Image (cartoon, rainbow, N blue to C red):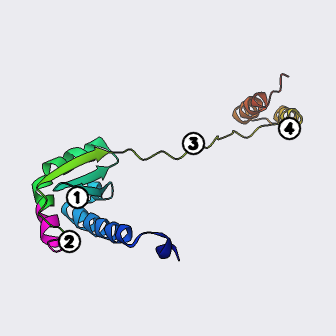
Amino acid sequence: MLNRLIAPELLRQARVFESMTRILRTCLTDECAMHCWVGGIRDQTLVVVTDHAGHATRVHYQQGEILECINKGFRSELPTPLTRLRLKVRPMPEAPVRDIRRPTLSSDNARRLLSTADGIADAGVKAALQRLARRGGADF
């Protein structure tokens, strides 16, 4: 159904770019491959997008090999061979940071911890329970 809503030429172009991305990734190290994809072609220039400048540097040094692989694999789809590679760095938006809340201790439970601490003979355990009770706002 979605295919009927999108222009056929646009779908064909997306499939070609997806295939080119697969070829591109075979030319790159595993560390870099999943951070790069084909973003387009313009005037015999392959546009490669990456999410980090460090990966862009690696791609830059491999551009000859990348262009050779793409040109070889896509002779029929390309009217003329690609001669240049252009890099774009587009950082991926980070996932929103969840507000991590620390568990709270009610003043009633803090009093219970203090009461328990009073009956403990071991000084270390007693001190730990008292510290925990103070976190709960117990000012005893």
According to the picture, the residue beneath numbered tag 2 turns out to be 77
Q: Where is residue 114 in the image (x, y as percent from the top left)?
A: 84, 32
Give, as a three-letter code, the residue at label 2.
Glu
According to the picture, the residue beneath numbered tag 4 turns out to be 109
- Residue shown at 83% from the left, 22% from the top: 139
Magenta-drawn stretch contains 10: no
Q: What element carries label 1?
A: loop
- N-terminal-most mark, 3 or 4: 3
Cβ atoms at labels 1 and 2 below 8 Å apart: no
Q: Magenta stretch: give its range.
A: 68-76
Q: Quadrant of the C terminus?
A: top right
According to the picture, the residue beneath numbered tag 3 turns out to be 97
- N-terminal-most mark, 4 or 1: 1
Q: Point out which mark residue 29 bears.
A: 1
Please name whichever residue, 123 or 2, is drawn nearer the observer in this view of the structure.
Answer: 2
Label 4 to label 2: alpha-carbon separation: 71 Å
Determine which quarter of the picture holds residue 96.
top right
Q: Main secondary structure of the magenta part?
A: helix
